[in-house]
Image (cartoon, coloured by chain):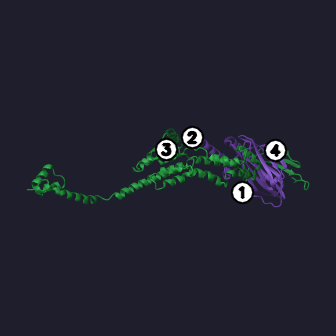
Chain colours: A green, B purple
């Protein structure tokens, strides 16, 4: 007699097998006990078999899964870096792009903290920038004004020196350095929110110093609406929240040095916009306009100077010929 | 803060845009007839004043190839050789002036008195090495037009100074 559910086994053997498989009902377990068989005697064997068979019954996917996760994380990281690079390069402070991206390359699970620490460091980049601007020009505070004056006086247009200094509102040349220093130390526009937005780092991930600054944070986020491209939807769970999280908050950490640097550079450039520049003669060929009309309204000469106005044809450039009459040669004959 | 940032950046960009046109950029602009330029091109805030320093001499008959567009007019000066010594340029705003120091310590100062779409009104002052005034004239020249100041002695010849106002 065999069990119909287990062909080849008698009823007792079938019960033992079902009990070993954990499939026996309460009645069947009682029946086994009545036959003198301990149904729980198979439990250790079943456990051992489960442990022995389970690892070998499926392929080891750990490495593949981790590689997939790492690959997705790397892709998301690259996308993040590219987005941030594009945002920073197109923003007001492209010179800071490398520094920001360097922070992203740190093996830090919380790059936002490192960046925030950098931005919050009053003695960090801002101060270094101010010193850098001055030192790049080989100047210290007190030397800026005199150097500017010397530069103007020694240039091609020394007569413009007073005008330039006056245009800058500088009664004293020594005040230039103070003005520049003051500009560099001016209150800063808040760009950190935009950077954090580009990083996909939300307020919750930052320090707790944002309390009570919601209005300012919203404004800050509006100030620096950096163009960040959409993030990949398939980013892994460990990365996706960081990418998808909106930058709704902003700290009181500020980035004033990019704008201040631009303003300082613009101010310095303004000094020289009226100064003539010399171009190597071999670089330029003279191009004469087809029409050259000159109407002389007034003309006066110095002593011992004779002037002739020559007009060859209608569209030819007018020639104002200065003949310096001197005692030795009596001028140049025409 | 937003306004402050915007103001700073706008000032910086405006200043850079107005003051940083490179010589290459300026020279790469096509030379078009003043008549068409005056009616089509917008009037820039500043005028590029260019001064070329040409040495005219009878000691030789070589003519700098870069002056080929000018020699037909210079031939009336009775010199046989022309050499381009220097080219200087400056951007001049309305009411501003630029001074150019040329060979022999002479100085050419150009003041922009006004300009419109077709003409620029300038004052040209030329002084000698001892600051003695040689010429002081006020004139209007068509846009991108050239006027030539010639005559200051240099070596065995003279200096020829084509002045061009481009904008």
- Marks 2, 3: nearer the viewer: 3
What element does badge 4 sit on? strand
**Residue A209 bears which disc, if any?**
3
Point out residue A275 in the picture as x, y percentages from the top left corner: 72, 49
Residue that mark 4 sits on:
B137
Distance in Å between CA atoms under marks 1 and 3: 57 Å
Discs 2, 4: same chain: yes
Looking at the image, do the residues carrying marks 1 and 3 touch, with CB atoms under 8 Å apart? Answer: no
Count of numbered marks? 4
Left or right: residue A36 versus residue B46 is left
Q: Is residue B87 left or right of residue A8?
A: right
Q: CA distance from mark 4 to mark 1?
A: 28 Å
Left or right of B117 on screen, residue A129: left
Verify CB contact (< 8 Å) between mark 1 and mark 2: no
Q: State how far apart marks 2 and 4 are (Cα).
A: 49 Å
Q: Quadrant of the C terminus of chain B?
A: top right
Front-most of residues A214 and B146 = A214
- Residue annotated with mark 2: B2
Residue indicated by mark 1: A280
Residue A108 is situated, as x and y percent measured from the top left of the image, at 46, 54
Describe the element under mark 2 as helix, strand or loop. helix
């Amino acid at each position: 007699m065999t069990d119909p559910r287990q062909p080849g086994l008698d009823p007792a053997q079938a019960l033992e097998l079902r009990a070993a498989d954990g499939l026996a009902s309460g009645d069947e377990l009682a029946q086994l006990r009545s036959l003198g068989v301990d149904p729980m005697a198979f439990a250790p064997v079943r456990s051992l078999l489960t442990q022995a068979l389970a690892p070998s019954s499926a392929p080891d996917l750990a490495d593949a899964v981790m590689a997939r996760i790492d690959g997705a994380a790397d892709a998301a990281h690259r996308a993040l870096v590219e987005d941030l690079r594009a945002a920073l390069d197109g923003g007001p402070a492209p010179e800071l792009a490398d520094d920001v991206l360097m922070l992203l390359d740190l093996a830090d699970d919380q790059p936002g903290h490192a960046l925030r620490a950098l931005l919050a460091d009053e003695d960090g980049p801002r101060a270094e920038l101010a010193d850098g601007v001055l030192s790049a020009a080989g100047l210290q505070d007190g030397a800026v004004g005199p150097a500017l004056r010397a530069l103007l006086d020694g240039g091609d247009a020394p007569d413009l020196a007073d005008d330039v200094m006056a245009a800058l509102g500088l009664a004293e040349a020594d005040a230039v350095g103070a003005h520049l220093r003051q500009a560099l130390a001016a209150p800063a526009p808040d760009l950190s929110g935009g950077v954090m937005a580009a990083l996909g780092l939300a307020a919750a991930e930052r320090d707790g110093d944002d309390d009570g600054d919601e209005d300012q944070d919203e404004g800050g986020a509006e100030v620096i609406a950096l163009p960040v491209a959409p993030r990949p939807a398939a980013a892994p769970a460990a990365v996706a929240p960081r990418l998808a999280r909106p930058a709704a908050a902003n700290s009181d950490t500020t980035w004033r040095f990019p704008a201040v640097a631009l303003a300082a550079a613009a101010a310095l450039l303004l000094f020289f916009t009226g100064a003539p520049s010399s171009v190597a003669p071999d670089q330029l060929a003279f191009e004469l306009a087809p029409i050259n009309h000159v109407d002389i309204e007034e003309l006066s000469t110095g002593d011992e100077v004779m002037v002739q106005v020559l007009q060859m044809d209608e569209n030819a450039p007018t020639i104002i010929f200065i003949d310096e009459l001197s005692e030795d040669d009596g001028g140049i004959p025409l | 803060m937003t306004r402050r940032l915007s103001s700073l950046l706008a000032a910086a960009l405006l200043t850079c845009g107005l003051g940083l046109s490179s010589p290459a950029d300026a020279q790469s602009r096509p030379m078009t007839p003043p008549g068409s330029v005056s009616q089509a091109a917008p009037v820039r805030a500043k005028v590029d004043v260019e001064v070329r320093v040409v040495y005219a001499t009878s000691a030789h008959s070589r003519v700098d190839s870069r002056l080929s567009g000018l020699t037909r007019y210079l031939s009336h000066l009775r010199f046989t050789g022309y050499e381009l010594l220097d080219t200087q340029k400056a951007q001049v705003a309305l009411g501003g002036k630029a001074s150019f120091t040329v060979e022999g310590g002479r100085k050419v100062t150009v003041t922009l008195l006004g300009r419109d779409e077709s003409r620029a009104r300038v004052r040209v002052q030329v002084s000698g090495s001892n600051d003695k005034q040689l010429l002081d004239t006020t004139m209007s020249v068509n846009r991108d037009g050239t006027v030539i100041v010639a005559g200051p002695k240099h070596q065995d010849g003279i200096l020829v100074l084509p002045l061009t106002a481009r904008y």
